[in-house]
Image: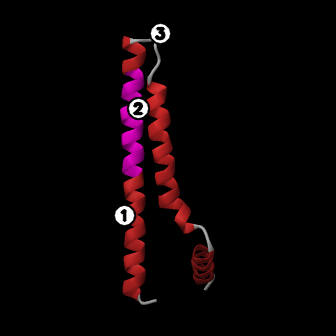
Amino acid sequence: MTDIDRYRMASKHVRKLKSFWIHLAAFLVVNAGLMTLNLVKQPDKLWFQWVLLGWGAGLLLHALLAFGGRIGKSWEERKINQIMRQEE
């Protein structure tokens, strides 16, 4: 694998991670607002948890795609190489 290939692969992974962190921030801000709105306007009728549950499932899938793809044989090889370089 050339340096250009490694750079492209790393760049793609960084974009996936950045996308996930932006998604997480939006999830937290919007759902905090919806929860506040629900509790202030209709405290006897809770509906915000359905949005939280649905969006949370999507966020979980996004996390698995962003982070889960890094675990496996290729990850093990990269980690071994990283540790070997640190010990030089």
Q: Report if residue 35 lies within the magenta region.
A: yes
Q: CA distance from mark 2 to mark 3?
A: 18 Å
Q: Nearer the viewer, residue 31 or 82?
A: 31
Few, some or many residues within 10 Å of mark 2 (<14, 14–19, 20+): some
Residue at image mark 1:
15
Query: Amino acid type of disc 3?
Result: Asp
Mark 1, residues whose alpha carbon is within 10 Å: few (<14), some, or many (≥20)?
A: few
Q: Earlier in the sequence, mark 2 or mark 3?
A: 2
**Which-is-in-front pick, marks 2 and 3?**
3
Residue type pointed to by label 1 = Arg
The residue sitting at the bottom extreme is 2
Q: Which residues are magenta?
A: 21-36
Name the residue tied to disc 2: 31
Percent x, y for residue 71? 59, 67
Residue at 54% from the left image edge and 67% from the top image edge: 70
Q: Is residue 7 above or below residue 56?
A: below
> Left of 18 or right of it: where is 80?
right
Q: Position of residue 72 (x, y in %)?
A: 61, 71
The answer to which of 22 and 38 lies nearer the viewer is 38
Query: Does residue 23 show up magenta in the picture?
Result: yes
Label 3 belongs to which residue?
Answer: 44
Looking at the image, tell me whether mark 1 or mark 3 is earlier in sequence order.
Answer: 1
